[in-house]
Amino acid sequence: METERAQDGEEDGEQTERLLDLVAEAQSRRLEEQRATFCVPQIPPNRAPAPPRPLEDREQLYSTILSHQCQRMEAQRSEPPLPPGGQELLELLLRVQGGGRMEEQRSRPPTHTC
């Protein structure tokens, strides 16, 4: 009985290993199919490379990218889906808890006398 369980466990392990190998092989092929080639353009000898950009240009570029990404994130933001009657429940909870409840529960930091 125990030898049968051991054999079943070994077979399950082998099957799992084969499955993982197949998945890895499929992903490897997919990555190879999606791989792009990058060719570095040859710089003619009469053209010198462009000087590095000043720090201000880099900061401007960074802030431009950051602001566009923030705008894009805000544009894609949506309200979470609420179940039927969920909005009314939230409004009721806010009314019951009241705006001052948080202030009532706030504690003052201890004063030190040295």
Image (spheres, helix red, strand yellow):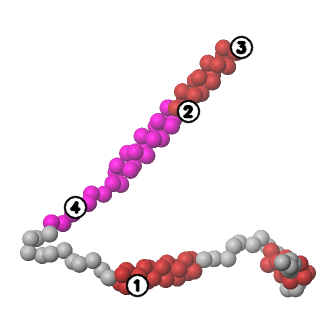
Crowd tier of the residue under label 3, counting other residues whose Cα lies within 10 Å: few below 14, some 14–19, many 20 or above:
few
Quadrant of the image occupied by residue 41: bottom left
> Which label was assigned to residue 60?
1
Quadrant of the image occupied by residue 13: top right
Split into 4 quadrants, where in the image is the N terminus? Answer: top right
Q: Amino acid at mark 1?
A: Gln
Using the image, determine if residue 24 lies above or below residue 91: above
Query: Residue at (45%, 41%) from the top-left corner?
Result: 24
Query: Sequence-wise, which precedes: disc 4 or disc 1?
Result: 4
* Residue 31 in picture, x, y percent from top left: 38, 50
**Which is nearer the eye, 88 or 6?**
6
Please say if the residues under marks 4 and 2 sit with CB atoms less than 8 Å apart.
no
- Disc count in the image? 4
Query: Sequence-wise, which precedes: disc 2 or disc 1?
Result: 2
Q: Is residue 65 magenta?
A: no
Q: Amino acid at mark 4?
A: Cys
> Which label was assigned to residue 16?
2
Q: How far is the residue under mark 3 from the one under mark 4?
A: 63 Å
Check disc 3 and report the residue beneath it. Answer: 1
Q: Residue furthest left?
A: 46
* Residue 108 in picture, x, y percent from top left: 86, 80
Check disc 4 and report the residue beneath it. Answer: 39
Question: Mark 3 against mark 1, which lies toward the viewer?
Answer: 1
Q: Secondary structure at mark 4?
A: loop
Chain part drawn in magenta: 18-42
**Which is nearer the eye, 77 or 68?**
68
Question: Mark 2 against mark 1, which lies toward the viewer?
Answer: 1
Q: Secondary structure at mark 1?
A: helix
**Which is nearer the eye, 103 or 80?**
103
